[in-house]
């Protein structure tokens, strides 16, 4: 079943493959123990393209990076206004090879994605190590962009998954990620208790 959150522009890109327009797949990993979000894009290292599209806004993002990271940037683009980190801001993604098998948009229970990131650099490994001792799980946000538009992802809201078991080697990170189990949540999800709402106890 097609994802209703995909923009018309990316639907057209998928359907007709217009010349020069490339779909860029990005992953953002978030965890309370991370120093900063981990952002990767399935692309080659490239800054000229994004500077041509974004000018000073892109340059300011690149200027804030250390030289090594800047050499490996594969995308600079704007996040959606509802993003959990840096909402509405231009941010950079590191170019890395990865495979992600996304779950279908369907009503089936607990759909899962699988993700494998190759040639993981030391910084990403360090961030994952920070999360290894925590009971909190890593959140993964998948956002598709198209190479002709860096003003926002082509799916809004983007797909958010929770990463389960993660395997880290010197060259690869792999794991499974599940969509939040919204089907079993109470609705409305506000819990009314006498502690939070004393007037309830007084009315009994």
Image: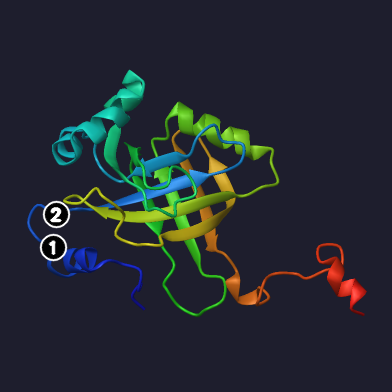
Residue 47 position, x and y percent, is 21, 33
Q: Quadrant of residue 154?
A: bottom left
Residue 131 position, x and y percent, is 62, 38
Nearer to us in this view, 48 or 203: 203
Q: Is residue 124 visible?
A: yes
Tag 2's secondary structure? loop
Label total for image? 2
Q: Which residue position holds label 2?
A: 21
Q: Quadrant of the N terminus?
A: bottom left
Q: Is residue 45 visible?
A: no
Tag 1's secondary structure? loop
Q: Which residue position holds label 1?
A: 17
Q: Quadrant of residue 92?
A: top left
Report crowding for label 1: few under 14, some 14 to 19, many 20 or more residues within 10 A (C-alpha).
few
Vertical placement of residue 188 versus 78, above or below: below
Q: Residue furthest left?
A: 19
Residue 178 position, x and y percent, is 54, 62
Which residue lies at the image location 69% right of the left edge and 41% below the top edge?
134
Residue 115 position, x and y percent, is 45, 53
The answer to whether 15 appears left or right of 130 in the picture is left
- In this figure, which colouring scheme has been used for the structure? rainbow
State the CA–CA distance, disc 2 to disc 1: 7 Å
Q: Quadrant of the C terminus?
A: bottom right
């Amino acid at each position: 079943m097609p994802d209703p959150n995909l923009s018309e522009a990316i639907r057209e890109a998928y359907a007709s493959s217009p010349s020069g327009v490339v779909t860029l797949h990005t992953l953002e990993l978030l965890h309370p123990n991370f120093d900063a979000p981990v952002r990767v894009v399935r692309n080659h290292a490239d800054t000229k393209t994004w500077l041509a599209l974004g000018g000073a806004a892109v340059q300011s993002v690149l200027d804030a990076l250390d030289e090594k990271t800047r050499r490996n940037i594969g995308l600079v683009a704007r996040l959606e206004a509802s993003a959990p980190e840096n909402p509405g801001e231009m941010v950079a993604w590191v170019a890395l090879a990865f495979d992600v098998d996304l779950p279908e948009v369907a009503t089936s229970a607990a759909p899962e994605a699988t993700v494998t990131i190759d040639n993981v650099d030391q910084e990403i490994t360090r961030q994952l190590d920070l999360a290894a001792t925590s009971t909190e799980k890593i959140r993964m946000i998948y956002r598709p962009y198209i190479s002709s538009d860096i003003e926002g992802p082509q799916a809004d809201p983007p797909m958010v998954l929770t990463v389960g078991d993660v395997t880290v080697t010197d060259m690869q990170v792999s794991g499974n990620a599940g969509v939040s189990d919204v089907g079993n949540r109470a609705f409305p999800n506000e819990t009314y208790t006498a502690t939070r709402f004393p007037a309830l106890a007084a009315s009994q």
